[in-house]
Amino acid sequence: LGGSSLAPYDSLNLGEHTGDDALKVAANRQRLTPFLPTEPLWLKQVHGIEVVNAALASRLPQADAAYATAANAVCTALTADCLPVLLCDVAGSVVGAAHAGWRGLAAGVIEATVSAMQVPPEQMMAWLGPAIGPQAFEVGDDVRTVFVAHDTNANAAFTLSPSCSQGERGEYLADIYLLARQRLQALGITQIYGGGYCTYSEPERFFSYRRDGDTGRMASMIWLSTST
C-alpha cells in the first residue's frame, strides 16, 4: 500500500521483474528510504538455494537468500505467494532472509540459510511472513511426492482438494507454513513465529501471483541495527 504503481501492480510494487514501469518501481523503493539504514540487497531470485552475504555481495546477485553479521546490511526476500522466512539468533549477532517457494523449500533453501549463518540452530528464531494459505495452495501429487521423499512427516501438510479430481494439478492443498516449520524444527529451531496469512485470499493487503498472474511483489526485510 502507499506506492506509485498502477493496476495490476498497485500500489507499492517493489519487484523490478514484474513488467511494471521501472520508474514507478524505483519510486516505490525510494519510499522505503526513511525506514531503512541503507539500500537493501535486492536479489535475483531463481527458486534455488544460493545464499549470499548481504554486506559483501555485488548488486543484484542471483540468489534466494541472504544473511548478515554486519550492522545495517538489509537482507530482503521478494514474494507474491512464496514464503518469506526471516531468521536471527537470540544474541542478535546474525540475521537472514530466505525466499522459500515450494521448489526452494524442497531443495533446502532454509537449511542452506541456517548453515550460512553459522550459529547453533537451537539459538535461532524464525518468522514466517505472508504466503499463500493452506486453503488456496493447490498442487499436484508431484509436489507432495518431493516433500514426502525427504520426510514422511510432510504428508501432514497435504490434504486432498475437494474441488479437483485425481491427477489434476490441484489434486492436493498444501500447507507451505507447516512444511517450513517441519524443516526448521528438523534443524533444531523451535522458536517459530508468524504464518497466519493468506496472500491469495487477502487482495486488499497482499499481492498474489496465483490469484492475479500479473501482479507486484512485496518485500520482507531484516537487519542488525548494531554490531555485536
Image (tube, helix red, strand yellow):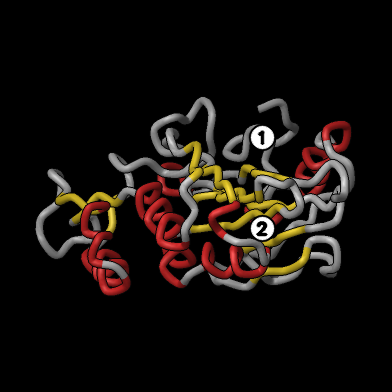
Residue for badge 1? 6
Badge 2 element: helix
- State whether residue 96 is above or below residue 223: below
Residue for badge 2? 17
Name the residue: 61% across, 48% down: 86
Instruction: Left or right? Give the position of 168 relative to 106.
Output: left
The quadrant where residue 24 appears: top right
Numbered tag placed on residue 175 in the rendering: none
Q: Amino acid at mark 1?
A: Leu
- State whether residue 73 is above or below residue 65: above
> How would you rate the neighbour count of disc 2 (Cα within 10 Å): few for under 14, some for 14-19, many for 20 or more?
few
Name the residue: 87% across, 37% down: 33
Q: Quadrant of the N terminus?
A: top right
Count of numbered marks:
2
Q: Position of residue 148 (x, y in %)?
A: 26, 68
Q: Nearer the viewer, residue 187 or 73?
A: 187
